[in-house]
Structures are given as structure tokens and as C-alpha cells.
Image (cartoon, rainbow, N blue to C red):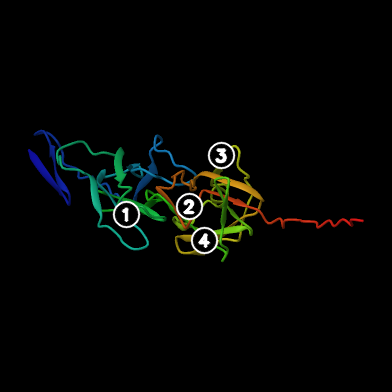
């Protein structure tokens, strides 16, 4: 004889011989499955930042001695400003197949361009055939793909410079406003204050004020404090995610080659008496 047993999530058939005595056995699965999600071991971060697509690996196991098997595994992504729908990455479709106590090595890829944010949380949950739902497992990512930019704008200090021997000279210390646009949690003050690169024959002393921060805009005033000729080759900025500035612009006049001479000339009048 043939007896069909109906479950919520599929058909399972038990065949008995003519001499069999039917003794129904009911197994109850009321234990939650366990879901886990982690970053792939080959997916590396820089100081906690991911700058490319992030690969995750999900798995689930149906707990307990009596288990009905994993039916479905799904994930969603949540940020401070949006939340996705649940997306299935595994679902039992072969209803006559062997029940799976454990399902693993399921890939999830988080698109770095779409989720270039801090606090990107990926949740994973699993269902078993009996209808039990796991607690949500999660991993938090910090993703940054937008490169910083720098603007350096000189103050003229209300002084008319004069040219001598091919160099424009100022008789006061020059200042410039350095404005860096970079996500707040990636701003690198040490890199910002060591960004000026000088030619070998240049004086090199600069002094930065305290930085002010307005969202992702970071501003300070740099003072060129030494007397002599400044010869600026470049300004380089690298943030905490190891992303270099995509653009650096200098604004004003005489932005890379200028001299500072605050020394007053000294003259002496000598008179002679003739007899």
C-alpha cells in the first residue's frame, strides 16, 4: 500500500508492504534554524573601509535532532536612508529531494557604487520546512568609493608683490585656505597637513590652523612662515580609505612659485668733513 503524507512545503511518500503494520510516527520540529553571514576571506578592507564591491558568504543550519530541513535563505540591505526588499538566495525546489540540514557558501555581493556609505548593514535569515524562522544574522560594512577633492585658494594679504630675479616676492607671510571635500569619517588630517610637496631648493615650512568641519567639507588656513623662495611641486592628499584626491586646484596668483622677504633694508648715511 502507498500512503502520502502532506507537509506545508511539499509531498513526501512512504511505501508500506502488504504485511506492514502502519504505526504513524510524528516528528515535531519547533527549533529555529541558525543563519550566519560574514565577509568573504578574500575581500579585504583598508582601515575598515571597502572601496570595491563587497563579497559576503551566507549559510544556515536547521538545529536540533529532529529537523525538517532548510527551505529558504534570504537577505536584505539597510542603510541610514534606504532599505531593500528581502532577496532569496536559496530555496528548496526539489520537493522529492533529500532534506538539507545545512546549506552554506552562498554568495552575496554588495555593489560599492550603490552603497557608498557608512553603516551598510546586510541581514540574513533562514526558514525551515516546518515554518520556523531564524533570528537575523547581520554584518555592518563601511563602503567608500567617492574620491576626495582639494581646493587651495590664496589670500593676497593686501600687498602688492614685486618681481626680482624671476621670483615674485611678498613682504609679509602668505596664507591660503585649504578646502578638502571628503567623507567625514575618512578625513585624514595628517595627510592634509603634509600634502605640500616642494622642490629640493625650496623653503618648506608651513603652519596649519585648526580644521573646521561642515559635513564632508574640511577647511583650514595654511601659512607660509619662512623667508625665502617657495617652490611648490604639488599637493597630495590620501584619505583613511587610501583614496587619493581626484582633483587638486590652486586659485589665486603666484600659487606655486613665490618668495617672502620681511627683512627691512638697512642703510647708513656717512658724512665726511672736508677741510
Label 1 vs 4, first from the N-terminus: 1
Does residue 102 appear in this view? no
- Judged left or right of residue 86, residue 272 is right
- Local crowd at mark 2 within 10 Å, few (<14), some, or many (≥20)? some
- Which residue, given by chain and number where applicable, does mark 2 sit on? 186
Mark 1 to mark 3: distance in Å? 49 Å
The label nearer to you, 3 versus 4, is 3
- Residue 214 versus residue 26: which sits nearer the camera? 214
Total labels drawn: 4
- Which residue, given by chain and number where applicable, does mark 4 sit on? 219
- Which residue, given by chain and number where applicable, does mark 3 sit on? 199
Q: Quadrant of the image for the C terminus?
A: bottom right
Q: Secondary structure at mark 1?
A: strand
Q: Are marks 2 and 1 in contact (CB under 8 Å)?
A: no
Mark 2 to mark 4: distance in Å? 15 Å
The label nearer to you, 1 versus 3, is 3
The image quadrant of residue 86 is bottom left
Q: Secondary structure at mark 2?
A: helix
- Judged left or right of residue 84, residue 232 is right
- Judged left or right of residue 66, residue 195 is right
Amino acid at each position: 500500500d502507498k500512503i502520502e503524507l502532506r507537509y506545508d512545503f511539499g509531498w513526501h511518500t512512504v511505501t508500506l508492504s502488504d504485511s506492514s503494520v502502519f504505526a504513524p510516527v510524528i516528528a515535531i520540529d519547533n527549533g529555529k534554524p541558525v543563519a550566519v553571514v560574514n565577509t568573504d576571506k578574500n575581500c579585504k578592507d583598508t582601515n575598515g573601509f571597502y572601496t570595491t564591491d563587497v563579497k559576503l558568504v551566507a549559510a544556515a543550519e536547521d538545529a536540533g535532532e529532529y529537523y525538517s530541513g532548510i527551505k529558504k535563505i534570504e537577505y536584505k540591505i539597510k542603510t541610514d536612508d534606504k532599505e531593500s526588499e528581502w532577496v532569496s538566495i536559496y530555496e528548496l525546489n526539489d520537493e522529492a529531494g533529500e532534506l538539507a540540514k545545512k546549506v552554506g557558501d552562498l554568495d552575496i555581493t554588495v555593489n560599492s557604487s550603490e552603497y557608498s556609505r557608512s553603516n551598510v548593514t546586510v541581514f540574513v535569515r533562514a526558514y525551515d520546512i516546518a515554518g520556523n524562522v531564524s533570528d537575523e544574522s547581520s554584518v555592518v560594512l563601511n563602503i567608500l568609493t567617492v574620491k576626495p577633492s582639494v581646493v587651495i585658494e590664496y589670500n593676497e594679504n593686501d600687498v602688492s608683490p614685486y618681481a626680482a630675479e624671476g621670483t615674485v616676492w611678498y613682504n609679509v607671510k602668505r596664507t591660503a585656505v585649504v578646502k578638502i571635500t571628503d567623507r567625514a569619517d575618512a578625513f585624514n588630517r595628517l595627510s592634509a597637513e603634509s600634502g605640500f610637496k616642494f622642490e629640493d631648493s625650496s623653503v618648506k615650512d608651513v603652519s596649519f590652523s585648526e580644521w573646521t568641519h561642515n559635513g564632508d567639507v574640511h577647511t583650514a588656513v595654511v601659512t607660509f612662515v619662512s623667508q625665502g623662495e617657495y617652490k611648490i611641486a604639488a599637493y597630495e592628499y590620501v584619505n583613511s580609505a587610501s583614496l587619493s584626491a581626484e582633483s587638486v586646484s590652486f586659485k589665486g596668483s603666484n600659487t606655486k612659485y613665490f618668495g617672502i622677504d620681511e627683512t627691512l633694508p638697512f642703510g647708513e648715511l656717512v658724512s665726511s668733513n672736508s677741510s
